[in-house]
Amino acid sequence: MCVKSDPSFFISAYIITLNPQFNTNMIAADKAFNLIMERPGKWGQEEIPFYQAYNRTLTKDIIADRDFPPFNRVTMDGIGIVYDKLSVGNKEFAIDGLQAAGSPQMELNDSDKCLEVMTGAILPKGIDTVIPYEDVSIKNGIATVNIPPRF
């Protein structure tokens, strides 16, 4: 990993710009910051182990050679639905199963139904929206969405 050394010049210039004893014609902090960032120094580069890179600046972008994870992951517990059904007023969905984290990908075959989904699970095929449990009521195997569609 190649990184630039952390220049103390940036901090010193910023403090001097803000401190009236050094500069009686002060400028706004955001303008001072922009002036500093427009004039980056060239302090060279060095290759260091990843664990030593904290508080350093990369000299080039890091690009992954593949997606990780290699699937769309659910980021909250809730129910997975087809948004078009909610947008036309359908607020009740029969629960058709549970997509658990670590389980093979399921598929929602009926857009009038939903699947319960867990954080970290593969997003089931056919689902384009996850509604968190906090915005849903579940009774007798029916999930009712308690919030209006947002789009």
Image (cartoon, rainbow, N blue to C red):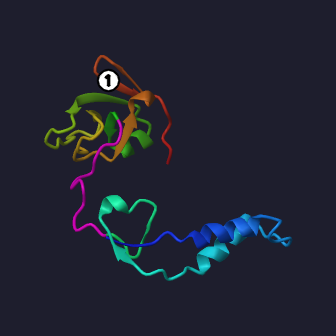
Q: Is residue 82 left or right of residue 8?
A: left
Residue 2, by quadrant, is: bottom left
The structure residue drawn at horizontal position 28% and vertical position 34%, both measured from the top left corner, is: 118
Q: Is 32 covered by the magenta stretch?
A: no
Three-letter amino acid code at the position of disc 1: Ile
In front here: 65 or 122?
65
Q: What is the span of residues highlighted in magenta in the rendered image? A: 63-76
- Position in image of residue 70 (x %, y %): 21, 56
What residue would you read off at disc 1?
142
Number of residue marks: 1
In front here: 103 or 111?
103
In front here: 105 or 30?
30
The structure residue drawn at horizontal position 25% and vertical position 47%, both measured from the top left corner, is: 126
- Position in image of residue 56 (x %, y %): 44, 66
Residue positioned most to the right = 24
The structure residue drawn at horizontal position 22% and vertical position 64%, both measured from the top left corner, is: 66
Residue 35, by quadrant, is: bottom right
The structure residue drawn at horizontal position 60% and vertical position 70%, both measured from the top left corner, is: 10
- Position in image of residue 71 (x %, y %): 23, 53
Main secondary structure of the magenta stretch: loop
Q: Is residue 69 left or right of residue 89?
A: left
- Residue 7 versus residue 39 in the image, above or below: above
Crowd band around label 1 with a 10 angstrom C-alpha radius: few (<14), some (14–19), many (20+) = some
- Which element is circle 1 on? strand
- Position in image of residue 97 (x %, y %): 21, 30
